[in-house]
Image (cartoon, grey):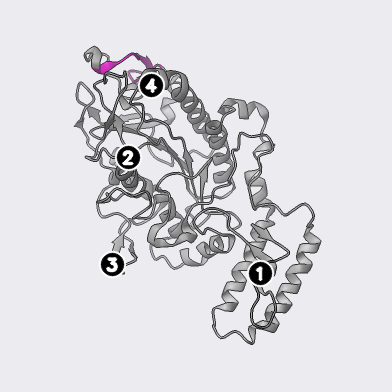
């Protein structure tokens, strides 16, 4: 939080030094405004960063739980009933290309999308598979925290924000699983606004001053802080104090930044556009994601969980999941295109695995990593494709198998990040961004 009045913590000289102006946690796991500013300084150290004019951004739509590929993008109408299920394919705006009947909005813009239907891996556990897809590395144990840094954290570390007054990495509407920075450090964890953008009066925590503190008073207190620090710095024994203070000064600049406030001000959008995205947390998070990347955030994860349809798969998809997903994602892709941002912003949608092609006795589908579909849109990639095929029951790839590392390698290529760049983990072991994988060439054109 932003604490203008300070707290009771004192140093030996009785001066409540930096606590007089504390710019506190913006998100979870230690992500604070000062830490966000450190992203800028540390990103400059990365030899593989090469900002070099690359202002591209990523919106990852995370379908946690495992979306049913055979009911969405890879229908098998000729398969036996116990495999093909209840849904029928419909035509898209690309002749000869069909997708599921409950994705009508996406069917109209399939020329702006490409679907890789042949992604595969061998891990059917939610935690391990999620960490694999979110980081590009397969863990050897089931754990509820990041062992390896998430892709968003890596992009944050290597690229920083496209606009210095904004965070590099944001999750919406709530934190996503395995989205943290692991050994890169908590300053590269995502910023989460701590509120649902669909709510009336949506306001990002800690990006506004308390109503009783105006900017003039804040500036007076900043001047006082500067004077106190000048007095106290002579007594500091560590050379890092000056640098830390500078991060706090810059942090205050961010917390009062009009650009940051404006980027999160979804209320400024035309109500008709908000309706087009869908007046629910998923739709409004996609709209807010567009606002953020347009303003200068580099990586946004929209957390659309709830796809673990072990029972009543078809009812859940038809009534609860697919209508919201289809509307929000199609609106996002179309809106980016209409604003001339398709080449700048890469949209990806994926979960940790697909669902079992064979329907279980509860009318559900279980975990199935043998085949899954991943959607790409924009980012300067080649659109209008269905890449790869699966066998007649959608169980395994028949052509053009792709790994999680191939999927993420494609994203890193768009972002201009060298996947061979080395970080050091907690044990001081060298860890490349990816240890395997190549970009999917069909997407590169």
**Whole-number angstrom distance, CA of label 3 to CA of label 2:** 27 Å
The residue indicated by pointer 2 is 126
* Lower position in the chain sequence, tag 3 or tag 1: 1
Q: Label 2 neighbourhood size at 10 Å, few (<14), some (14-19), many (20+)?
A: some
In the image, residue 292 sits, relative to residue 189, either above or below, namely above
Q: Which mark is residue 429?
A: 3
Q: Which residues are magenta?
A: 83-101
* Pair 3/2: label in front: 2
In the image, farthest residue toward the front: 8
* Lower position in the chain sequence, tag 2 or tag 4: 4
* Residue 144 place in picture, x, y as percent: 37, 48
The residue indicated by pointer 4 is 94
* Pair 3/4: label in front: 3
Q: Number of marks in the image?
A: 4
Residue 52 visible in the snapshot: no
The residue indicated by pointer 1 is 19
Q: Secondary structure at mark 4?
A: loop
* Pair 4/1: label in front: 1
Q: Quadrant of the C terminus?
A: top left
In the image, residue 123 sits, relative to residue 371, either above or below, namely below
* Lower position in the chain sequence, tag 3 or tag 2: 2
Q: Label 1 neighbourhood size at 10 Å, few (<14), some (14-19), many (20+)?
A: some
* Pair 2/4: label in front: 2
Q: Label 4 neighbourhood size at 10 Å, few (<14), some (14-19), many (20+)?
A: some
Q: Residue at x 56, y 63 (%)?
A: 37
């Amino acid at each position: 939080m932003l604490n203008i009045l300070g707290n009771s913590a004192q140093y030996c000289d009785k001066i409540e030094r930096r606590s007089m102006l504390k710019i506190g946690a913006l998100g979870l796991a230690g992500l604070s405004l000062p830490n966000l500013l450190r992203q800028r300084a540390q990103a400059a150290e990365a030899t593989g960063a090469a900002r070099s004019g690359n202002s591209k951004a990523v919106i990852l739509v995370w379908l946690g739980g495992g979306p049913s590929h055979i009911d969405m993008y890879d229908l098998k109408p000729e398969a036996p009933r116990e495999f093909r299920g209840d849904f029928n394919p419909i035509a898209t705006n690309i002749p000869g290309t069909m997708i599921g009947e409950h994705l009508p909005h996406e069917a109209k813009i399939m020329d702006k999308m490409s679907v890789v239907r042949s992604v595969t891996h061998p891990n059917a556990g939610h935690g391990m598979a999620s960490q694999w897809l979110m980081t590009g590395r397969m863990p050897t144990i089931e754990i509820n925290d990041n062992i390896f840094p998430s892709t968003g954290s890596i992009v944050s570390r290597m690229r920083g924000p496209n606009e210095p007054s904004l965070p590099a990495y944001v999750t919406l509407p709530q934190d996503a699983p395995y989205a943290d920075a692991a050994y890169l450090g908590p300053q590269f964890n995502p910023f989460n606004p701590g509120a649902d953008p669909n709510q009336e009066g949506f306001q990002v925590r800690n990006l506004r001053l308390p109503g009783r503190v105006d900017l003039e008073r804040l500036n007076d207190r900043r001047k006082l802080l500067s004077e106190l620090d000048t007095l106290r710095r002579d007594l500091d024994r560590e050379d890092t104090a000056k640098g830390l203070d500078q991060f706090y000064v810059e942090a205050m600049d961010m917390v009062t930044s009009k650009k940051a406030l404006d980027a999160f001000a979804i209320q400024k959008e035309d109500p008709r556009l908000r309706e087009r995205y869908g007046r629910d947390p998923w739709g409004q998070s996609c709209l807010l994601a567009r606002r953020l990347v347009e303003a200068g955030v580099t990586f946004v994860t929209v957390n659309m969980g709830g796809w673990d349809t072990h029972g009543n798969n078809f009812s859940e998809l038809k009534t609860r999941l697919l209508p919201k997903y289809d509307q929000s994602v199609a609106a996002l892709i179309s809106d980016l295109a209409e604003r001339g941002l398709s080449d700048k912003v890469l949209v990806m949608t994926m979960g940790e695995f697909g669902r079992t092609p064979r329907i279980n006795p509860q009318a559900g589908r279980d975990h199935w990593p043998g085949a899954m579909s991943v959607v790409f849109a924009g980012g300067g990639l080649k659109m209008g494709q269905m890449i790869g095929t699966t066998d007649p029951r959608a169980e395994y790839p028949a052509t053009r198998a792709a790994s999680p590392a191939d999927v993420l390698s494609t994203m890193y290529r768009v972002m201009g990040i060298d996947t061979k760049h080395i970080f050091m983990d907690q044990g001081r072991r060298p860890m490349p961004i990816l240890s395997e994988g190549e970009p999917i060439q069909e997407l590169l054109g």
